[in-house]
Amino acid sequence: MNIALIAHDRKKELLVNFCVAYKAIFAQHKLFATGTTGKVISQATGLTINRFLSGPLGGDQQIGALIAEDNMDLVLFFRDPLLAQPHEPDITALLRLCDVHNIPVATNIATAEVLIAGLKAGSIDFRKLKNK
Ligand SMILES: O=C(CO)COP(=O)(O)O
């Protein structure tokens, strides 16, 4: 499955720790991330991550393009709900596309835990049926 990993600055450590904890699961999938998020996760875990531009420079839109083409199966986007982002429209657009294409998306660690448990249990296997 293709998995997108994104975190705002004050949530990066949380996502890194999450990826360390579930490294064995993430290692079985193809990982994508916005620029800085991908860098810190790969440094901490050694996981191979396809990195796009940093979010404020268009990285959210690049991941959004994969979602629009139905090429993303799961999105973990640890947003900072207490800090305004300069690229808020890009963030809204990415999340909107998840809804357009019915892509499982977690915007906080509690939901991410549930989605990873679902991924492990095969609950997201319906994505393998896409375009069939
Ligand atoms: O801003 C982001 C998501 O909206 C994340 O971008 P970075 O991973 O480059 O910090």
Image (cartoon, rainbow, N blue to C red):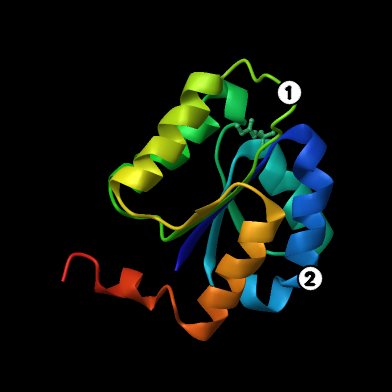
Q: In this orientation, does residue 46 appear? A: no
Q: CA distance from mark 1 to mark 2?
A: 26 Å
Left of 49 or right of it: where is 72? left
Q: Residues within 10 Å of mark 1 (few under 14, many from 20)?
A: few
Label 2 residue near ligand 1, CB within 8 Å: no
Give the vertical position of 70 relative to 18 (above or below): above
Label annotation for residue 21: 2
Q: Position of residue 128 (x, y in %)?
A: 31, 73
Q: Quadrant of residue 88?
A: top right
Left of 7 or right of it: where is 92? left
Give the vertical position of 35 relative to 108 (above or below): above
Image quadrant in which the C terminus is located: bottom left
* Farthest left residue in view: 132
Per the image, the residue denoted by label 1 is 83
Left of 49 or right of it: where is 40? right
Q: Quadrant of residue 64?
A: top left
Marker count (numbered) = 2
The kind of secondary structure element at disc 1 is loop
